Amino acid sequence: MSGFFVWGKMKIKLDTHWERRTKHSFLTQEEIQNLFKIAGFKKTVFSSEVITNGLANTNYKVVLENFAKPFFLRIWTRDSNACQKEFLLNEKLAKFKVPVPKIYFTDWGKSKVDFCWGIYEWVEGVQMTQALLNSTEKQIEKYFQEAVKIHNSFSKITFEKSGFFNNGLEIIPFEKGFALEFFGELLGNPQIRNLLGKADFEKLVKFIEENRSKFSKLETENHLIHADFKSSNFLVNPKTQEITGLVDWEFAFCSSPIFDLGMLLRFENELGSSVKKSVENFSELDLEEDWYETAKLFDLMNLLDFMTRDLVEFKNVVEHCTELVKVTLKRFS
């Protein structure tokens, strides 16, 4: 299901209308059967269906004969290296009681087929994005309280330094000033200037310049970051607002946990003040007085990067992210 839900006078759309980054990788039932055979499953595939939610990789719900629960089959179509990263992170996350699905088998070496894939435990629940479209203000607040509690759990995981992970989960350190340099590249993109217009572009430059000291957090803090910490990656029970799973760790890296909070707050203008209150009331981080401004600054990197995509192929993504950037600039100008 996708579409808009009007809550009060506010239209909730989140990212339900965003275009996919990659095409689905469609497999025949015979091909899926072969993957399960490679993984050591002897039972016959009874049924399989593509899960259409998501913006990049291809996921299947697979039912085997005489198995009570389905399985989750994941095909990496965006970043094949993410397969190994997610597998290695899974054990660490489970120890910290982060609700991640058990991984039964992965093949990141493309030993039998020409793509990376994995078979996961099936987690019951609906995508939190879809649940939010039909939620009351109180239910929205409960969802985000639960999300912040999960953030508390995995942000306790630290590594020896900040940086990106390589395939073996070793850290590739950030270069000093990388965040400010990345912002500089984005500001030099004429498409961003044209989309924002002269007045808002000048506000953006001023906002970044006034807050440039905050970028040191990204380069010096060494907490585990999900890096795609948004409602579409949560599975939830709509009856209880319990979060049953947090998926898609392919972008994970080590830096400031405020980065993830910025993504969690991305659609707060549609969802109401309870999102920010959930962070303030339930986060176990030692939040500084300007934490909120820092979180919004960090998410600007993501939003501006989305704005550089093709204007025709990703029309909805670009337009919505432009709108979100303008909301942030208005809030702090």
Image: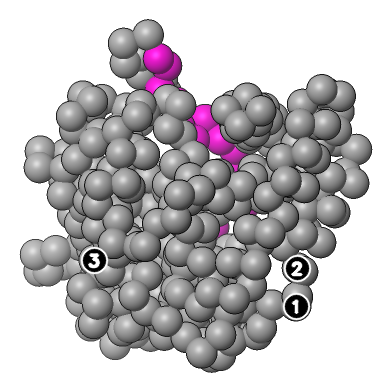
Residue underneath mark 1? 175
Task: For residue 55, say whether it is visible.
Answer: no
Q: Which amino acid type is shown beneath numbered disc 2?
A: Phe
Q: Are marks 1 and 2 in contact (CB under 8 Å)?
A: yes
Q: How many marks?
A: 3
In the image, the segment drawn in magenta is 10-27
Badge 2 marks a residue whose secondary structure is helix
Quadrant of the rendering where the C terminus is positioned:
top right
Q: Which amino acid type is shown beneath numbered disc 3?
A: Pro
Magenta span dominant secondary structure: loop
Which residue occupies the foreground of this view, 152 or 93? 152
Quadrant of the rendering where the N terminus is positioned:
top left
Indicate left or right for 76 with 45 as reference: right
Task: For residue 289, say whether it is visible.
Answer: yes
Please tell me in which quadrant of the rendered image residue 195 appears: top right
Which numbered disc, 3 or 1, marks the residue closer to the eye?
Answer: 1
Residue underneath mark 2? 178
Cα–Cα span, label 1 and label 2: 5 Å
Coloring basis for residues: one colour
**Residue 15 sits inside the magenta stretch:** yes
Which numbered disc, 3 or 2, marks the residue closer to the eye?
Answer: 2
For the point 24% across and 52% down, which residue is it? 282
Please tell me in which quadrant of the rendered image residue 102 appears: bottom left
For the point 81% across and 31% down, which residue is it? 201
**Residue 289: where, in percent of width, then height?**
45, 49
